[in-house]
Amino acid sequence: MSPQTHSTRQLIDWDRQYLWHPFTPMKPWCEDKDILIIARGEREFLFDTEGRRYIDGTSSIWCNVHGHCVPELDSAVKAQLDQIAHSSLLGLGNIPSILLAKRLVELVHACGLALDKVFYSDDGSTAVEVACKMAYQYWRNVASPTPGSDTRTRFIALGNAYHGDTLGAVSLGGIPIFHAAFKSLCFPVDFVSPPTQPDSLAQIERLLKANPHAYAGIIVEPLVLGAGGMIIYPPEILGQLRALADRYRTLLIFDEVMTGFGRTGTMFAAEQGRVTPDLLCLSKGLTAGYMPLGVTLTTRKIFDAFYADPRVNPEKTFFHGHTFTGHPLACAVALASLDLFDQTHLLVHVQRMSAILAKTLEKARKYPYVGDVRHLGLIGAIELVADKTSRTPFPSAWRVGGALCTKMRSLNLLMRPLADVIVIMPPLAIREENMRHLCDGVLNSLQWLPEIVAQKTREFPT
Ligand code: PMP
């Protein structure tokens, strides 16, 4: 371990002076006395600059799989570093990106998904950008030569969806607090209710029927709307979405940036619906949470629509790429992560941890101020509400979820809520005793809610 060369106080001062944090109202951040700075990690633990140890209860924003500082993953990065850190995929190949593409296609085939081609990008948002641009250009490439004969410029997305923060992904986003400000910069998208509402699929069908040549694709987060509050819907919906896309001849895009790589209990959420999308977006767990890397997988049919002689059809090429596309270090760690999935039988372990989580959530349901609990695989959500019966939310300014998560630090748990939804999503490889510690801690912390609510009532008098 390299020695820490600066005091926590100094680092906090510099953080406040020089940094602008993501998704963060910076005024309270700069006024906060307790900024926590992570110095290192070890399996499911994070350590701060004062040496305090915490369970990483959100797997560092839903991406860590095997834990931190895993020897096999560290060695894979170091071995690749001894060869080369980075070379470009523009006009060249590199070894790890070839091996990973082959491995991913074999993996999705083994999971029953008929996807044959891998396009690399940098993260979840760019994997989604690629999927949208591919879907859009696919229809242009296969359209008859008559200009304007099939101008599919729109997408269908779900209310409460989150697909990332680049502008294409924001166009597809349905969370007002994140997305509303940017909507006039965005491309046209029709939003339907999330599939937890009975009318959701009928709304999609109405749109497709009314405008049969308008839609390039339908995009969903399969099974779980993540940032929208861990809203979970049944796998049968995926088959119904596939049927609608086929019936009305549009493309189906699954954003598995969060659900991919074991989080829902299967390698991919799509498996649970036995559905192959036309485009599949992956990131986060792809590199076990070690490095940024995105991929968009697609079918041979879509690939073939771009497969043309550039002297005759230059416009059919997919003109998209990033400097760090197919980054060798990230691909090397992704390959090592897939080895570990097999060697540690990780999906079996996830089932066992998932059972512990299920019991905890059922107990949580009985607590005051708990309006709902949701669970799938190693995703747990506890929704806090002002009134249990009517499920009336707390005023958002109260930040009850945030206050509770901050207090959980005293139990050595690092948690981050989605508004007032407490999210339990540790690294998939969390050991059983620590899973129990995490679950017991969250459950016990619910006893603090009456005190937090009383304090907020005093802080925000009506
Ligand atoms: N799609 C989904 C479903 C996500 O949950 C996220 C990130 N939370 C993204 C896309 C964006 O990924 P990134 O933050 O890596 O750009």
Image (cartoon, rainbow, N blue to C red):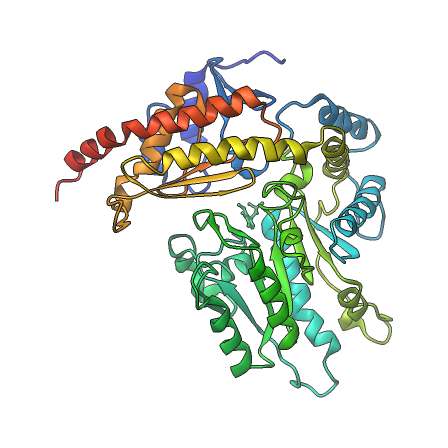
Between residue 321 and residue 444, name the one nearer to us.
444
Between residue 272 and residue 89, name the one nearer to us.
272
Between residue 449 and residue 334, name the one nearer to us.
449
Res. 263 in view? yes
Q: Quadrant of residue 351?
A: top right
Q: Position of residue 412 (x, y in %)?
A: 44, 20
For residue 430, side relative to residue 110 (left or right): left
In this view, 109 is above or below 315? above
In this view, 336 is above or below 246? above
Residue at the image point whose x is 66% and y is 46% from the top: 122
Q: Quadrant of residue 460?
A: top left
Q: Position of residue 213 (x, y in %)?
A: 60, 81
For residue 403, side relative to residue 203 (left or right): left
Name of the residue lying farthest toward the bottom: 146
Q: Position of residue 317 (x, y in %)?
A: 77, 66
In this view, 147 is above or below 22? below
For residue 185, side relative to residue 74 (left or right): left
Q: Position of residue 258 (x, y in %)?
A: 57, 45
For residue 345, side relative to residue 396 (left or right): right
Residue at the image point whose x is 62% and y is 13% from the top: 2
Quarter in which the N terminus is drawn: top right
* Tally of numbered tags: 0
Quarter in which the C terminus is drawn: top left
Res. 30 in view? no
In this view, 254 is above or below 413? below
